[in-house]
Amino acid sequence: MKLDIQHIKRILGFAFLMGFQMGLANTWTVCSNCENSSIKETILRAAPHDTLLIEKGTYKEFEILVDKPLVIKGIGYPIVDGEKKGEIFRITSDDVTLDGLFVINVGVSYTKDNAAIRVVQSKNFLIQNMVLEQLFFGIYLEKSSHGKVYHNRIIGDAVDEYNSGNGIQLWYSSDIEVTKNHVQGTRDGIYLEFSDKITITDNVSRDNLRYGLHFMFSDNDIYTNNLFENNGAGVAVMFSKFITMKNNTFRKNWGTAAYGMLLKEINDAEIIGNTFEENTIGINIEGSNRIEYANNDFIGNGWAIRVIGACYTNSFKGNNFLYNSFDISYNSKLNDNVFEGNFWSSYTGYDLDKDGIGDVPYRPVKLFSYVVNRTPETIILLRSLFMDIIDFSERVSPVFTPDNLKDAQPLMKIRS
Amino acid sequence: MLKILKYSFYDLIRSRWSYVYFLFYLALGFVLLFLNNDVSKAVITLMNVIIILIPLIGTIFGVMYFYNSREFTELLLAQPIKRSSIFLGQYFGVAGSLTLSLVLGLGIPFLLYGLLRSNAIFNFSLLLVTGAFLTFIFVGLSFVIAISNENKIKGFGYAVLLWLFLAVVYDGLFLMSLIIFEEYPLDTFSLVATMLNPIDLSRILILLKLDISALLGYTGAIFRKFFGTDLGFLVSMAILLLWTLLPILSLGYKAKRKDF
């Protein structure tokens, strides 16, 4: 009984304290000719859980340290100008919200990866409606978790890979949502390293120097409904496990080493419902096992899928391969992958029993693709009558291409 | 010359060959569009047909016409007409009527299926232009073969062989040499080898517009630089023009010296 009373007392005390704190949660207004004209100093004065309203204007500040839980909100997109002197926001506390600021001129440093916004070892942060320009790194999340990066616009002007930074970088972070951001003109649009359980949704990443989205050693991540366009090399997924990739669009990644998606050492992933359009190579696969490719559309790529080696137990089902120069390219005679129920626009078989499935198997690998792998210059003979004749004879009796590499149940009609 | 051109032209129309050729392309165009229902995809399929069939038809037709109208040619030679205008007139009559059949035969179905509203119009006109070039080149080559060979069988044989060589065998040799010399830089070689064959050149010209993403995957710098620019396009067109002029000049030269 006695114990219970003490317990209740404690709860009451706690509630009282909470109320006290809530009551004291102040709102500070920052503007260029108010009492508080500097963001940095106002943060020093503010108590935890206060709100800072930044009015329209230009604030020439950098290395703004946010070390207590605050809501920092811009009204009419005030400009925070770092004057290329260094990092701009550095968040080291939990429960911080940044909202509606226009951050420009991050200082370039090759020893410190200066970012417009850096979050260090924090939880429950929210970064939203920010516009970042003239940046080195954009949003840099370091050993942080349970946060949200929502609806930001990051526009870089990167020219060379060696002296530019990434748009959104996650390093040793987990449980973070990256949603509805627009990243362009940086090195990697979104970069994940050692980051698990990240959800990346509805983002647009385009015109980046290297990859639109880049995974390194990051497991159990999901990315859906994103658009990756005209990047140096599309999306690279490397050395990661259990990645889910759904309903993304990969477009116009053109160039000598450009891919829609590059998979390297990826295991147990799902690639479902994506669209690969007009890339030099749709998916480049190397050393990746147990991946399910289903219901994807490959339209007008140079190579729809290029398998380089050591890829086992992958399954390709219900995909549309439309008007690619090469549907599948292999560089070995061995095949352990399953192709079933795909639609191939260059399929020429018939369907006598009218069950919607072609009666003759389709062999997606052309002999020509082997020749091109060996001597790239021979691409100049693409679509010539001689190559067509050779491909045809190889298709009739395969000698160089894997004998079991075929779609035994090709669809007659395009899967819609 | 114009009179003879006109005569050859009407002669072909009267002999119904132009109609057959025209109807063939008309049917081809309609069937392709009916099956694909998409102008830009039909253009791709059409490319293969054009690259192979136009040279073949041009060659056969040219040789046939030349041998068939031999008596008439001899009659004309008895008249006070310049030799070059007799032969060039016949040449332009044949090539012109074939080109007209091609352009109308393919143009009508594509226009009906809404080419003007599609963005494939540039690809399509490029297709027709290269088709016209190929017609002129191969009719010219076949005329040269026919004028140098009295023997019809021999002439026919050479003409078909020429087509076979340029359409198929050449690419085979090209491929072989690329693979044999794969250790050496092959950029310039492959560029030059393409230029030396009008069929290959037309194919690359059209491919540039259609399969650009695949060609950009190519690693050679020279190659990409050449085909990635307008300069490459202009040079290719100039070479095609050169290929057209070559048989015409040699036809004029041969006609002057031949003893009938």
Image (spheres, coloured by chain):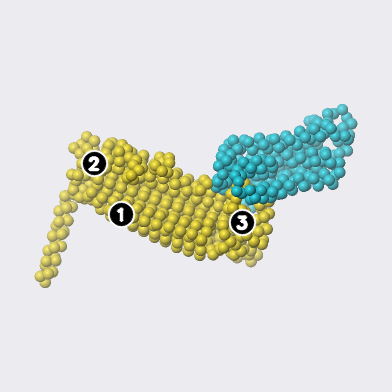
Chain colours: A yellow, B cyan
Q: Is residue A272 above or below residue B110?
A: below
Q: Is residue A333 visible?
A: yes
Q: Quadrant of residue A65?
A: top left
Kindly report which numbered mark, 1 or 2, lies closer to the viewer in this rendering: 1
The residue at 37%/54% (across/down) is A193
Find disc 1 in the rendering and name its residue: A144
Q: Give the Cα separation between the discs numbered 3 and 1.
A: 48 Å
What label does residue A366 carry, if any?
A: 3
Q: Is residue B93 left or right of residue A144?
A: right
Mark 1 residue element: loop
Please identify the quadrant where the N terminus of chain A is shown.
bottom left
Between A324 and A141, the one lying in front of the other is A141
Q: Is residue A323 above or below residue B248?
A: below
Contact (CB < 8 A) between labels 1 and 2?
Answer: no
Q: Give the Cα separation between the discs numbered 1 and 2.
A: 24 Å
Q: Earlier in the sequence, mark 3 or mark 1?
A: 1
Kindly report which numbered mark, 3 or 2, lies closer to the viewer in this rendering: 3
Residue A20 screen position, x and y as percent: 15, 53
Q: Amino acid at mark 1?
A: Ser
Q: Earlier in the sequence, mark 3 or mark 2?
A: 2
Q: Amino acid at mark 3?
A: Lys
- Badge 3 crowding class, 10 Å Cα cut-off, few under 14, some 14 to 19, many 20 or more, is many
Find disc 2 in the rendering and name its residue: A39
Residue A44 screen position, x and y as percent: 19, 44
What label does residue B206 carry, if any?
A: none
Between B234 and A4, the one lying in front of the other is B234
The residue at 77%/47% (across/down) is B161
